Every structure is written in structure tokens, then in C-alpha cells.
Amino acid sequence: MTIDLYYLPASAPCRSIMLLAKAIGVDLNLKKTVLTNGDHLKPEFLKLNPQHTIPTLDDNGFSLWESRAILAYLQSQYGKDESLYPKDPKKRAVVDQRLYFDMGTLYARIGEYYVSSERVELMSIPVEPHVWPRGQRLQPRLVRFGCE
């Protein structure tokens, strides 16, 4: 059984999958995917994941991306018990609620914090100056990456 995980070591979503795999005794074949090298745009990767995102899991030909979906799949497929992802709908709903909170609220706020102009400048990534109207979400435009 070979389960490939295409990942970046510093990615929190990738790390969560690696932590779960270790907790449930699943060995992953880690395939470091360097986005700045274009690894995620190579034809063999696009066959696995046409959205070219990481993490991406390849479980013997079954491809899956999006970390929370991968977490649920691994636990459902290989977990030895229900302690991490219960089958009872109400208990599972609470776990799902926490996963969605992480994805939709917590992770977004952490990202906003680390991509604020002061922190981006500390990382030597130039940010176009922009005046933000009061109450508008902080979304600085990263010049170096051409994002607008």
C-alpha cells in the first residue's frame, strides 16, 4: 500500500495530514512539492489534481485534495476507531464544525495577520501602498507575485 502525499513542509494544512497519519499509523510517502519551481503545474501532477493545489493525496490511484477532505478520508478509511471522527451524526457534526471554523475563520484570520504589510515587509516581499477604508478587510496586493 503506497499513499503519496504531495506537500510543503511549512504548510499547516499539510502538517495536519502528517500528524493524523502518524496518529492512526498510516505511512505516507512524502513528495515535497515546491510551488516556486512549478512542481504543481507539471502534467503528471495536474492529472492527480487539476486545481494544482497542495496538499494532494494519491492513495493507489484515488486522488484527493483539500486538507479537511483528506483528513476525513484517512480517518474513515484507515482509522482504527471512531475517537477522532465519530460515526454518530451529532458527534461528527461537532468535529466538522471545528474543521470548518478552522478553514473559514481561524485560518483566514491567521493569514491576514501574517500577510499584513508590516509582516510582509519583514519577509522582504514588497507591498504596494494602499489606503484601506475603515472596516474593509486587509488584503494587501503583493507586487512580487503579481497578485491583485
Image (cartoon, rainbow, N blue to C red):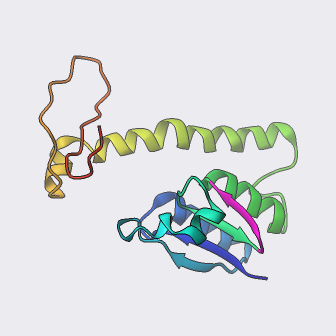
Image-based side of 48 in relation to 76, left or right: left
- Percent position (x, y) of residue 88? 88, 44
Which span is picked out in magenta? 60-65
**Residue at point 21%, 52% (across, down):** 144
What residue occupies the far front of the structure in this picture?
Answer: 43
Image-based side of 115 in relation to 68, left or right: left
Front residue of this view, candidates 110 and 120:
120
In the rendered image, the quadrant that contains the C terminus is top left
What residue occupies the far top of the structure in this picture?
Answer: 134
Image-based side of 8 in relation to 124, left or right: right
Front residue of this view, candidates 65 and 17:
65
Q: Is residue 83 magenta?
A: no
Quadrant in the picture for residue 70: bottom right
Above or below, 109 relative to 87: above
**Residue at point 46%, 69% (across, down):** 8
- Percent position (x, y) of residue 60? 77, 75
Above or below, 35 relative to 84: below
- Percent position (x, y) of residue 94? 72, 39
